[in-house]
C-alpha cells in the first residue's frame, strides 16, 4: 500500500525557515546534493532550447546548469532566502516563491521539470507527481531525485544508544516511491551512497549547513552537550574510511504522454 505523510501545514513554514537560514552557506556544504543532481542530469541526457522548471531550486546551481545549456529556466523554491540567492546569481529567467505540492503554474506550462532532493520534504508524493504531470506539456519529461527509507541510518542508530528522542525524519520506503510512479510512463533507478567523515562535527555541520535539520516530529530540546556529543561519537559505527553516513536514493524519470 502506498504510504504518504499527512503533515500539518505548519511544517511548510518550518522547512522554509530552516532552508532560509542555510541559504548564505548552502553551497559550501552541498557537494552531495550536487553529485545527486549531476546523476539526475545524466539520466535524462542533454536538453537544449527547452522551458524548464527547477522545482526546489535552492541557490540555483542546477538552474544555472540548464540555463548554460541554452534552456529557459523558471526557478521555484519554498524558501524566500534560497530563491533570493538564486536570483542574485542570475540563475534563471523567472523566479517563483511557491510550494511543489500546489504549483502556481498553468497546465502544460513547461517542457521539462527538474527536482533534485526536494520532494522528500513534501507531504504527499502522488500529489507532487500529479502536479508535475499537470504542468508538463505533451512530450515533456520530469526528472526527480529523493531519499528513501534507510537514509541516515547510522545517525538514527547512534542516537538510539544515547536517548529516545526523534532525530531524523521518516522517509518513504523505496517500494512506495516506485508505486507512486506506476500510473505514469517512467523509469526508476535506486542506489545507495555512503559518505565518510573524519569527524562527527563535520558530518553534523553538513546536515545543518544544507538546511536539512528540520524535524517533522519535533526536535530535541536544547543544544547537544559535550557529554552527549561524546556518547554519540562513541556509538557511531567505525570504518577505516571514517564515520559512515548512508543515503538510499531514488531517481525517477517520468514522461508526459
Image (cartoon, helix red, strand yellow):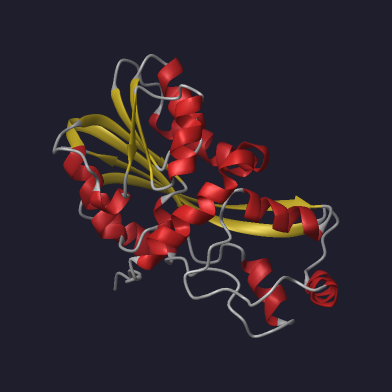
Q: How many marks?
A: 0
Q: Quadrant of the C terminus?
A: top left
Residue 36 in view of the camera: yes
Where does the image place residue 182, in percent across and percent down from the top left?
A: 25, 55
> Image check: 214 left or right of 237?
left
Q: Residue furthest bottom?
A: 164
> Residue at point 29% right, 44% down?
186
Residue sitting nearer the eye, 255 or 171: 171
> Residue at point 62% right, 76% down?
220
> Image check: 97 left or right of 207?
left
Quarter of the rendering containing residue 254:
top left
Residue 147 in view of the camera: no
> Residue at point 17% right, 43% down?
134
Where does the image place residue 204, in percent across and percent down from the top left?
A: 71, 58
Quarter of the rendering containing residue 45:
top left
Q: Is residue 197 above or below residue 255?
A: below
Where does the image place residue 107, in percent across and percent down from the top left?
A: 13, 38
> Image check: 129 left or right of 55?
left
> Residue at point 22% right, 48% down?
131
Where does the image place residue 173, in percent across and percent down from the top left?
A: 43, 67
Q: Quadrant of the N terminus?
A: bottom left
Residue sitting nearer the eye, 4 or 218: 218
Q: Is residue 166 above or below residue 179?
A: below
Amino acid at each position: 500500500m502506498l504510504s504518504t505523510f499527512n503533515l500539518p501545514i505548519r511544517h511548510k513554514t518550518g522547512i522554509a525557515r530552516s532552508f532560509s537560514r542555510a541559504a548564505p552557506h548552502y553551497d559550501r556544504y552541498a557537494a552531495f546534493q550536487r553529485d545527486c543532481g549531476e546523476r539526475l542530469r545524466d539520466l535524462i541526457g542533454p536538453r537544449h532550447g527547452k522551458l524548464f522548471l527547477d522545482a526546489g531550486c535552492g541557490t540555483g546551481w542546477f538552474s544555472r546548469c540548464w540555463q548554460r545549456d541554452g534552456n529557459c529556466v523558471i526557478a521555484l523554491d519554498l524558501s524566500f532566502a534560497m530563491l533570493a540567492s538564486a536570483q542574485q546569481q542570475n540563475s534563471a529567467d523567472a523566479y517563483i516563491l511557491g510550494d511543489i505540492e500546489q504549483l502556481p503554474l498553468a497546465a502544460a506550462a513547461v517542457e521539462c521539470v527538474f527536482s533534485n532532493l526536494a520532494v522528500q520534504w513534501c507531504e504527499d508524493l502522488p500529489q507532487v507527481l500529479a502536479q508535475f504531470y499537470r504542468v508538463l506539456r505533451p512530450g515533456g519529461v520530469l526528472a526527480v531525485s529523493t531519499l528513501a527509507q534507510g537514509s541516515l541510518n547510522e545517525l538514527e542508530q547512534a542516537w538510539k544508544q544515547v536517548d529516545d528522542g526523534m532525530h531524523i525524519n521518516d522517509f518513504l520506503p523505496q517500494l512506495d516511491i516506485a508505486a507512486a510512479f506506476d500510473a505514469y510512463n517512467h523509469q526508476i533507478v535506486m542506489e545507495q551512497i555512503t559518505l565518510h567523515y573524519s569527524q562527527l562535527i563535520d558530518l553534523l555541520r553538513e546536515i545543518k549547513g544544507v538546511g536539512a535539520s528540520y524535524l517533522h516530529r519535533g526536535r530535541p530540546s536544547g543544544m547537544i552537550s559535550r557529554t552527549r556529543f561524546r556518547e554519540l561519537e562513541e556509538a557511531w559505527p567505525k570504518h577505516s574510511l571514517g564515520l559512515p553516513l548512508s543515503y538510499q536514493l531514488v531517481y525517477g524519470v517520468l514522461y508526459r504522454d
